Image (spheres, helix red, strand yellow):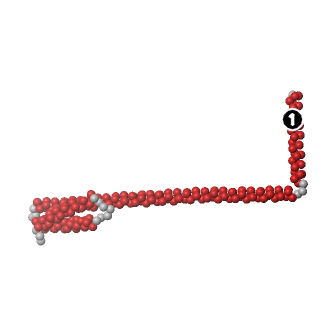
Amino acid sequence: MASFVTVRGQAISLESQTESLLSKFSQYAQTTSSEPTSQERNLDSKLDSLLTQRQEVVDSLSNICNENPSISASKLSQLQRHREILQEHWQHFRNLRSSIQQERNRLNLLFSVKKDIAQQSEQDQDKYIQDEARRIDESHNVVDSLVSQAWDTRDQFSSQRTVLQTANNRMMQTLQRVPGINQVIAKINTRRKKNAVILASLITLCILFLFFTW
């Protein structure tokens, strides 16, 4: 079986390697990316394996102490110190892992929120453009309808004017064909004029009579 000094030398060497790797691993907690890199995974695996190996070395030291009842108190104290350092390194490693994962989750959450906001903004913009296009189309349809109604009204007026003009022409032609009709119309107009003069004279006389007799 290996001596206590030999095994303890392995423990000290592994502790030094662990401290160096933990120092490198802590840099990922300061500059975390959204996804772990291959270097980060490799370093994580090395630390886990190294700490497990150290646990085996500490267990070997413990077995040596248990098998040697006359082991010195200083060696027992050294064993206890190696156990404490191992626990500290395990705790430090777990804390770094946790910090890196928390920061990674935060970054992914921020990225997800920004992505959702960008998508929502794009959807709102597309919806606004579609709504404006729909309003413009509706306005064009209203204008087209008004123009169509105006043209229909214009055609109706034109048609009615043609009908009236035709009826007037036919009436004039009919009047010209009937013998003496123009003379009858002229006499009627003359009689109307005379009746109007008589009526006006009568009204004038009534007004004068009232004026002088009042």
Quadrant for the C terminus, please.
top right
The residue under the point 17% across, 64% down is: 17
Q: Count the numbered circles shown.
A: 1
The amino acid marked with disc number 1 is Thr
Query: Label 1: which residue?
Result: 204
| Residue 68 seen in the current view | no
Q: Does residue 187 appear left or right of residue 61 in this picture?
A: right
Residue 36 sits above or below residue 212 on the image: below
Decide: few, some or many residues near mark 1? Use Cα within 10 Å; few <14, some 14-19, many ≥20. Answer: few
Residue 95 sits above or below residue 60 on the image: above
Q: Position of residue 112 (x, y in %)?
A: 38, 60
- Given residues 86 and 120, the one toward you in this image is 120
Quadrant of residue 73 within the rendered picture: bottom left
Q: Position of residue 43 (x, y in %)?
A: 24, 65
Q: Position of residue 133 (x, y in %)?
A: 53, 59
- Given residues 138 and 71, the one toward you in this image is 138
Quadrant for the N terminus, please.
bottom left
The residue under the point 22% across, 67% down is: 46
Quadrant of residue 35 within the rendered picture: bottom left
Quadrant of residue 78 within the rendered picture: bottom left
The residue under the point 87% across, 28% down is: 212
| Residue 112 seen in the current view | yes
Q: Does residue 159 appear left or right of residue 45 in this picture?
A: right
- Given residues 164 and 69, the one toward you in this image is 164
Q: Does residue 18 appear left or right of residue 74 in this picture?
A: right
The residue under the point 58% across, 58% down is: 140
Q: Does residue 118 appear left or right of residue 89 in this picture?
A: right
Q: Position of residue 103 (x, y in %)?
A: 31, 58
Tag 1 secondary structure: helix
